[in-house]
Image: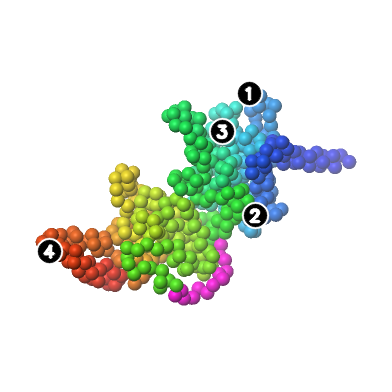
Amino acid sequence: MFLSGRIEELRRRYREARLGGGIDRIQRQHEAGKLTAWERIEKLLDPGSFIEFGTFVRHRCREFGMDKKFAYGDGVVTGYGTINGRPVMVYSQDFTFMGGSVGEMHAEKIARTIEIAMKIGVPVIGLNDSGGARIQEGVASLKGYGEIFYRNVMASGVIPQIVAIMGPCAGGAVYSPALADFIFMTGKSFMFVTGPKVVKAAIGEEVTFQELGGPDVHSTISGVAHFVYESDEECLNGIKKLLSYLPSNNMDDPPYVEPEDEPDRTSPELDNMIPEDPMKPYDMKDVIIEILDKGSFMEVQELFAPNAIVGFGRLNGHVVGIVANQPKVYAGCLDINSADKISRFVRFCDAFNIPILTFVDVPGFLPGTAQEHGGVIRHGAKIIYAYSEATVPKITVIVRKAYGGAYIALGSKHLGGDMVYAWPTAEIAVMGPEGAIEIIYKRELAKAENPEELLKKFVKEYRERFANPYYAASLG
């Protein structure tokens, strides 16, 4: 039959498209411990839900022998499907064809995917595994990157953008993930603007791929990566979990999940979590986990700026964004990195209708020339701007210390906090009692026969009169 022959031809071409760069290259991908572009999509999305578009797109380059190199799809699989029944757009770069390099048509497919996601109001997920720009296509490749970057910016704050780095990501390729909301990295991935060879040629420094831009670097030092997982499968499951906290777009509400525990339950454990000695550290995560719905806390950027905690959780099934100080690290002081971490997270929550719950135990901003020279003033101001600008519900709990400008910055009433609670252990003041007394009673202490005893006396009086929640409550 005439039609059956045409249908068989179509099926043959689809099968060929699934092979990407060929069986040998697929085998090499597996030997490297990585899934293929198609395998990643199949593990990410609900079974049978993926619909591909742009299957037969091919590059148009004829230079440098490119007329003899082609694969259907041009090195990227694009389409839509569902995750736990929710529609998403997805693109997955295929390293088996020319190292997943980005050419004009490859980029056009990605840009189109983001564009459709904006139009229909669904999250877009990118699975990156690319050697960077396709050099053979020259400036056409750069044009393609620009088209992607523009869509990333236009989609910012409109739909959630999630990118997983599952292989190499170098040069211009790094900026699209940087413009997304969340970056995942796998154990064998890396990302950097300039690679080890260029670094050595330019400044003589010898460095490995992992030392320059591996997941350990970006999750602890640079803060570029929000989540790190060892394998592709773990990474894809992490994306699914994150998506369960996010709305489909900025006009939608985050997903509700029926809680396992009672919303009006009491938590006697909280009574013993805060040490009697205000100088003694404790783990703020214990407080957060106890208050949130059972098993609902998902921390973001756990290893970066650990003196601050941000993440998602649920209260009575409803999603909330968590911001907190961590007294175990730098006594919970704010610094340059924690300011960036907090402000970016607050602005994301505000864009996507996620209420913000802040737990405060902060003695101030971290002192020192490194912080001042690094611009802690400029970075600290970002927190003030983010909280002031946020229009979502903002609830703040002052757990212990709330001193000076750091107190103001962290969701205080003065920046539009809707409700501010203080535990009996709260100390709300311009600075710590010891520092305040040394300034106020400088002359008396200098003349005293026993300055240490007098200091203790003044500190006790100051704490009883001013550095407590009742004095702050009396001022409204």
Secondary-structure class at tag 2: strand
Q: Which quarter shows the N terminus? A: top right
Residue 458, horizontal then vertical, whole percent: 19, 67
Looking at the rendered structure, the kind of residue marked 3 is Ala
Q: Which quarter shows the C terminus? A: bottom left
Looking at the rendered structure, the kind of residue marked 4 is Ala
Separation (CA) of disc 1 from disc 4: 86 Å
- Left or right: 205, with 228 as reference point: left
Q: Nearer the viewer, mark 4 or mark 3?
A: 4
Contact (Cβ within 8 Å) of mark 1 with mark 4: no
Instruction: Say whether residue 181 is visible.
Output: no
Residue 164, horizontal then vertical, whole percent: 56, 47
- Left or right: 151, with 376 as reference point: right
Contact (Cβ within 8 Å) of mark 1 with mark 2: no
Separation (CA) of disc 4 from disc 3: 72 Å
Looking at the rendered structure, the kind of residue marked 2 is Thr
Residue that appears at 62% across and 35% down: 99
Q: Please, which residue is most extreme toward the front here? A: 450
Q: Please, which residue is most extreme toward the top here? A: 64
Closer to the chain start, of discs 4 and 3, is: 3
- Left or right: 282, with 19 as reference point: left
Secondary-structure class at tag 3: loop
In the image, is residue 414 above or below residue 316? above
Separation (CA) of disc 3 from disc 2: 30 Å
Which residue position holds label 1? 64
Dominant secondary structure of the residues highlighted in magenta in the image: loop
Which residue position holds label 4? 448
User: Does the magenta portion include 179?
Assistant: no
Closer to the chain start, of discs 1 and 4, is: 1
What residue range appears in magenta? Answer: 255-268
Q: For residue 82, which numbered disc appears in the image?
A: 2
Q: For residue 133, which numbered disc appears in the image?
A: 3
